[in-house]
Amino acid sequence: MFIVLHGADEFTSREALARLMADPAYGFGADASTVAIERFDGTLADLQAVRMAAETLPFLTAGRLVLVEGLPKPKRGEADREEPSAASAPPAEPPTGKGKRGAKKPSAAAQAREFAAGLAELASTIPTTTTLVVLVAEELPKTHPLLAAATQHGKVVLAAPRTGAALDQWLAARAKAEQARIEPDAARLLIELTTGNQRLLAMEIAKLATYVGAGGTIDRAVVQRLVPDDREARVFDLTDALARGERARALDLLHALLEHGEAPLMVLAMITRQVRTLIQIQDLASRGARAPEIAQAVGLPPFIVDKTLPAARRSSPAQLAAALRACLEVDTALKRSRMAPELALDLLVAEFSGTRA
């Protein structure tokens, strides 16, 4: 059996793999000791080792699982350059008598294609006692040879991040599996607080179901009481990256918030609040106040102050003052529709980064 698990949602891929391994239809069953498992790092592209493992018959076990995690990555720019075809390639030069020394090593892109093609060929030749699983943390193009091989000789599972109604249904099913029920408005709030991260959602649902007990109902009040706001953590990481001058990481964090459906004005409000908090903490720390005193003065838990103090110390007063002015200017621009929201926030990050002192 040949199975390809691909898609950007690594959590869903791992859960799909666990379900496959527990499915008797694939020869595994509930007892993992009945299967010999071999794992390979596909980024290293050792096709021969994978082939030997896949073609080896099991010994003292009912079956064999060969798991290839990842595929080799072409070097930057190589993926866009096609290898010359046989028709267009220049004529081969006559042998120079130097043996293999003059042979040109295949490019990383060519090696990546060769590895994927080799795995695809294995799909039709592996023994029935072997299940070969290729796990790729990105969505493969529809024309990829691995998808064609898995469609013909096994199974393709696409682990795309769930959104909208699909995520709502998944969350309700998850709660039911934990012997609880979640109200629609509680589900919406939970998705909002975790920015739709399915790994976080699974952990929070398990916690909430334990809290309400078997047969209980998870309502909005329970979610508000027990679930931390992951958005706030991301905004803290964003402003911390800016304080460090890590503009590229800050932009990645900003775009992750926007891609998870956060409204630009909401993101801006959280950034502004975080900058104000940094200014307060920095001012109190400069006057000799300790973390417990700062926490009491600004109304934050002590552990939040402990986490925020390093970022406040990395930022100069001039930097934070300029950042706050930039937040207010962007807020005005967005409310008056003078600038595209994403562009305005990108410029805010650029200006914040440029004010380091």
Image (tube, rainbow, N blue to C red):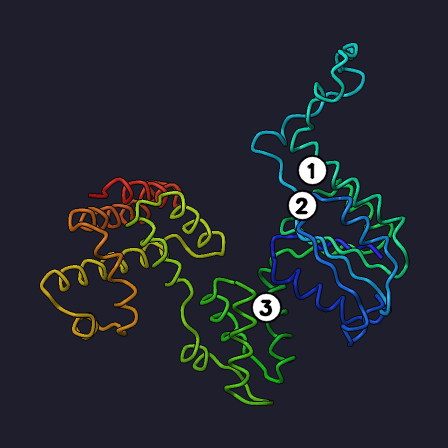
- Can the viewer see residue 302 in this picture? yes
Q: Residues within 10 Å of mark 2 (few under 14, many from 20)?
A: some
Check residue 168 in the rendering and tell me which mark sits there, or answer none.
3
**Image: 279 above or below 91:** below
Q: Quadrant of residue 295?
A: bottom left
- Give the total number of marks visible in the rendering: 3
Q: What is the CA distance from the residue labelled 3 to the residue labelled 1?
A: 38 Å
Can see residue 6?
no
Q: Between marks 3 and 2, how big is the CA–CA gap? A: 32 Å
* Residue of label 1: 112
Residue drawn where x is 90% and y is 49% of the image: 125
Does label 3 or label 2 sit earlier along the sequence?
Answer: 2
Side (left or right) of 38 relative to 167 = right
Q: Residue at point 85% right, 68% down?
A: 27
- Residue 4, horizontal then vertical, whole percent: 75, 53
Position of residue 292 measured from the top left corner of the image (x, y, whole percent): 20, 74
Mark 3 residue type: Asp
Q: Is residue 40 left or right of residue 346?
A: right
